[in-house]
Image (cartoon, rainbow, N blue to C red):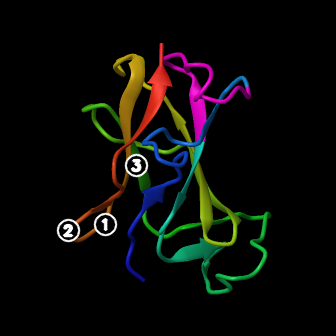
Amino acid sequence: MTEAPGIFTYPNSQQAVAVNQDFSYNQDTPAAPGSYITFYITGAGGLLYGNQYYTDIGGVPPASPWATPQIPVLVQFGNGTPAPASFAGLTFAGVVQVNAQIPASAPTGNAVPIQVLFDNLAPPNASSPVATIRIQ
């Protein structure tokens, strides 16, 4: 299955639908460098449930263990080096939750670019369109 990731954003906006570590919405409250954010993507491609390929795409996803993308999920803040997500797992049919730590070196502002990349073993890597988050 081919990966074509996309980050969920608010309507008519590039602002990612993201929740800060303190459970506030990132749209209303900027996140701090070093803290974690949670956001959601689609288009993760093939998923693994334990050691097996997860094929029930339209069903209720399992929660123990989580169905996870087959390919490592990387998150890039601004123009920084992509870093592995701390968690990526299927939470709703077709929706993958991504938790990522904001690097201390991340840029600050009300529209910091964020992008998801799938680190394929053979190029090309798949990447999402750019969304934005607030970091202060």
Give the alpha-carbon distance from disc 1 to disc 2, as whole Å. 6 Å
Question: In screen coordinates, is 125 left or right of 92?
Answer: left
- Residue 123: which disc? 2
- Dot 2 falls on a residue whose secondary structure is loop
**Badge 3 is on which residue?**
74
Which residue type does callout 2 highlight?
A: Pro
> In this view, which residue lies farthest toward the front?
12
Is 83 magenta? The answer is no
Q: Is residue 38 above or below residue 31?
A: below
Assess disc 2: are there few (<14), some (14-19) or many (≥20) residues with their C-alpha within 10 Å of its C-alpha.
Answer: few
Judged from the image, the secondary structure of the residue bearing numbered disc 3 is strand
Whether residues under marks 1 and 2 lie with C-beta atoms below 8 angstroms apart, the answer is yes
User: Residue 25 occupies which quadrant of the picture?
Assistant: top right
Crowd rating for badge 1 (residues with CA inside 10 Å; few <14, some 14–19, many 20+): some
The residue sitting at 38% across, 16% down in the picture is: 108
Image point (55%, 45%), residue name: 10
Residue 29 included in the magenta stretch of the image:
yes
Q: Position of residue 74 (x, y in %)?
A: 40, 49
The image shows residue 2 at horizontal and vertical percentages of 38, 78
Instruction: Confirm or deny contact between disc 3 and disc 1 (CB under 8 A).
Output: no
Closer to the camera in the image, 121 or 76: 76
Label 1, on which residue? 120
Q: What kind of residue is marked 1?
A: Asn
Q: Is residue 6 above or below residue 122?
A: above
Is 85 situated left or right of 75 in this image?
Answer: right
Between disc 3 and disc 1, whose residue precedes?
Answer: 3
Q: Secondary structure at mark 1?
A: loop
